[in-house]
Image (spheres, rainbow, N blue to C red):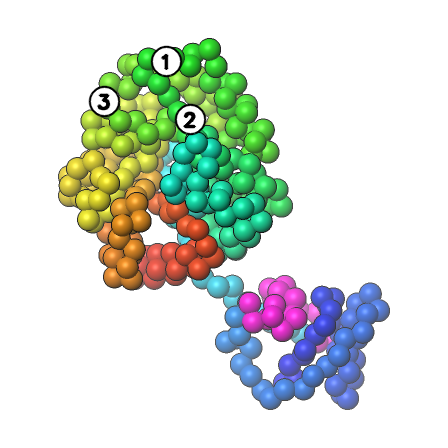
Amino acid sequence: MNLLSIFDTSYILKNSKNDRIRAFHGKSIHLKTKQKENMKDLSRRKFIRTGLVSFAGLAVAGPGLLKINFPAETTAVDKVKLGNSGLEVSRIALGTGSKGGSKASNQTRLGMEQFVKMAHHGYDRGVRFFDMADSYGSHQYVGEAIKTLPREKVTLLTKIWTHEDGSDRNVPVRESLDRYRQEMGTEYIDIVLMHCLMSGGWSNNRKHYMDGLAKAKQDGIIKAVGVSCHNWDAMVEAVDNPWVDVIMARINPFQSHMDNTPDVVKELLGKAKKNGIGVIGMKIFGEGRHVSDVEREQSFKFALTEGNTHCMTLGMESIAQVDDAVDRVMKIVKG
């Protein structure tokens, strides 16, 4: 068949046998004859580069009309149920806190345009879960990225910094959440975690925050609550706490930036899963210390097959890293 070299984004009508075609809206399009090629082997990006509109499954019936069957989309990361939280999330979350703190991170340092471009590419590859924190300064960046995306198709997670002594009680939890929602441009936040718990006893000395988050959950402002753990005792406490819907835990096969040995941590996370808690793995590459080709493969395999995680957050900083993560993860998932 003749392949069409198109210089317009209109739908296509076949005109006659002399290789001329015309577009809807009366716009002219030129035909360029090429040798036969298996269209199913063409990727979506190749269609875009050659000017074809990516409109999957377009088929126009009627005499003399051209039928186009576009190839399947590039492999996308799958979705998983996040414990008993009631949420279904992409298996990979786009982390926005690499080298994060003081309202900035490697992701925000990309600049708004580059971040949004990476986030939209991730969305196309199925990465529809965004991991933020107030301290990363990433709310506005994700907010800009999701402006043109269906809100119901993305999952937003953020973290609130808490103090053992409750020194910021003068700022109500609801007030902080309202600011977060305004920065993201959303009416609700799917998950809010107490950020970076570094000791046990948090369920007693952080009641102020827990009550505020529980009330926001009751009011529909957030859907799930939980903790981000950077301490073994804090994580042990979280596993048996009925308040906790979600745990974010450090897990990798190298015991790098972890709270115990890989075997001990994965056993505890297995208990969390049995209790219905959603488990999100973080520090999958040991905070960037293990990123060789072999180590990345080993890290993904451990998190997916042994680590007792439902999903993982990755501090990706480029489109290439998004593609690498999705391809590797789905290869392991599909066996």
Q: CA distance from mark 3 to mark 1?
A: 16 Å
Which sits in the foreground, 162 or 305? Answer: 162
What x and y, as percent, mark residue 242? 30, 23
Where does residue 25 sit, x and y in percent of width and height? 82, 65
The quarter of the picture where residue 58 lies is bottom right
Q: Amino acid at mark 1?
A: Gly
Q: Which residue, given by chain and number where applicable, does mark 1 sit on?
A: 166
Q: Which residue occupies 61% across, 42% down?
A: 147
* Quarter containing the C terminus: bottom left
Which image quarter is the N terminus in? bottom right
3 or 1: mark nearer the eye:
1
Dot 2: few (<14), some (14–19), or many (≥20) neighbours within 10 Å? many
Q: Is residue 48 magenta?
A: yes
Relative to 9, 126 lies left or right: left
Q: Residue at x 44, y 40 (%)?
A: 105
Quickly name the residue at label 2: 160
Count of number-bearing discs: 3
Determine whether 231 is above or below 18 in the image. Answer: above
Range shown magenta: 45-66
Q: Amino acid at mark 3?
A: Gly
Neighbours of disc 1 within 10 Å: few (<14), some (14-19), many (20+): few
- Residue 28's disc is none
Q: Secondary structure at mark 1?
A: loop
> Where does label 3 land, which residue?
200
Q: Main secondary structure of the magenta part?
A: loop
**Residue that appears at 49% across and 42% down:** 108
